Image (cartoon, helix red, strand yellow):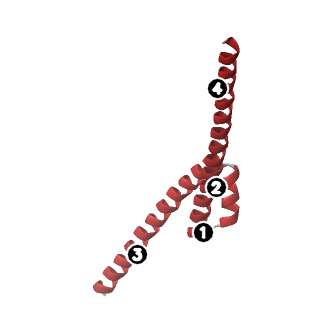
Amino acid sequence: MIESRLDAAESKVRDLENQIQKESTNSSYALGLVVFLFGGVCAIWAQNTDRNPWKWFFLGLLFNVFALGVVLFQNGRDNFWRRNLEKRKETIHRRLREDNTQQ
């Protein structure tokens, strides 16, 4: 009787160990996919902003969260300069039109 209970307990322990091992393998795949996606996002951003996509892909792979933070910071900075450039162009065009109408 005790032996059968012991065998049943050992069987349950083995099943739990196998289940834990399968779950750790699945989480490794998920982590790999997330890291790859970080690299992909960085590469797409780099390609759209005329930067080296391969460099940013590998930076995203190696330094995933930090590289994504740099990408977001740099993107905000680029947008700021782009908006200011557009405002300056509009101001220059408006002044040129005003000068032409006064003459």
Residue at 70% over, 50% down: 62
Q: Earlier in the sequence, mark 2 or mark 3?
A: 2
Q: Which mark is residue 12?
A: 4
Q: Residue furthest front?
A: 1
Residue at 65% over, 54% down: 60
- In the shown orientation, is residue 72 left or right of residue 67? left
Q: Quadrant of the C terminus?
A: bottom left
The answer for how far apart the CA atoms under marks 2 and 4 are is 36 Å
Q: Around disc 1, counting alpha carbons within 10 Å, would you say few (fewer than 14), some (14 to 19), or many (20 or more)? A: some
Image coordinates of residue 76 in percent, x first then y, are: 50, 56
Q: Earlier in the sequence, mark 2 or mark 1?
A: 2
Q: Height in image: 31 above or below 18?
A: below
Q: Height in image: 59 above or below 91?
A: above
Image quarter of residue 48: bottom right
Residue linked to disc 2: 36
Mark 3–mark 1 CB contact (< 8 Å): no
Numbered disc 3: secondary structure = helix
Q: Earlier in the sequence, mark 1 or mark 4?
A: 4
Q: Residue furthest left?
A: 101
Q: Height in image: 78 above or below 101?
A: above
Q: Label 2 is placed on what type of residue?
A: Phe
The answer for how far apart the CA atoms under marks 1 and 4 are is 53 Å
The answer to whether residue 66 of the structure is visible from this angle is no
Residue linked to disc 3: 92
